Image (cartoon, rainbow, N blue to C red):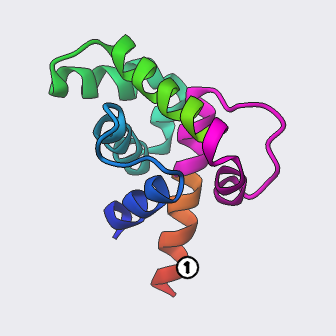
Amino acid sequence: MPNTIIDERLQALGVTKNYKGYHKLKLVIELALEDEEKLYSVSKNLYQPIAEKCGCSAGSISRNIRTVIDNIWKNNYHNLCVIAGLKLTEKPTVTQFISLLVANVQRSSMASAV
């Protein structure tokens, strides 16, 4: 179920599978959903394992997600605020963005389980 919710949220934000960062962001969110404490050290606990799995650097993971955030901020600000549950006054950092998506997926998963 969380996989479907992640796909739905990303699509609502205009992030489609043709984005280079789509699959990497999805993997990062899945890892963070397994253990929220991984959000305390994103580079070590999220980027590095995904980078090893994808055969790239941790820096490229972060860069790809920043590009996704830039596009969302320009083109889907309203949907981002809806998913965040508040009006954002600044573009979120990569870590903030991941945290927002993780929280939204968790809320959606709990709501659909009821």
Q: 100 left or right of 6?
A: right
Residue at image coords 67%, 32%? 92
Which stretch appears magenta? 73-101
Q: Tell which of 59 and 39 is nearer to you.
A: 59
Q: Count how many numbered circles sit on residues in the image.
A: 1
Q: Tell which of 45 and 62 is nearer to you.
A: 62
Q: Tell which of 57 and 66 is nearer to you.
A: 66
Image quarter of residue 50: top left
Q: Is residue 94 above or below residue 34?
A: above
Q: Tell which of 111 and 73 is nearer to you.
A: 73
- Residue type pointed to by label 1: Ala
Across and down, in percent, residue 96 comes to: 63, 34
Give the residue number, with chain letter if any, for mark 1.
111
Image quarter of residue 51: top left
Across and down, in percent, residue 55 comes to: 15, 19
Residue at image coords 45%, 34%? 38
Q: 111 left or right of 62?
A: right
The N terminus, quarter of image: bottom left
Residue 14 lies within the magenta run: no
Residue at image coords 58%, 29%? 70
- Pick out the residue farthest to the bottom: 114
Q: Is residue 82 above or below residue 44?
A: below
Q: Main secondary structure of the magenta part?
A: helix
Residue at image coords 53%, 70%? 108
Q: Is residue 57 above or below residue 47?
A: above
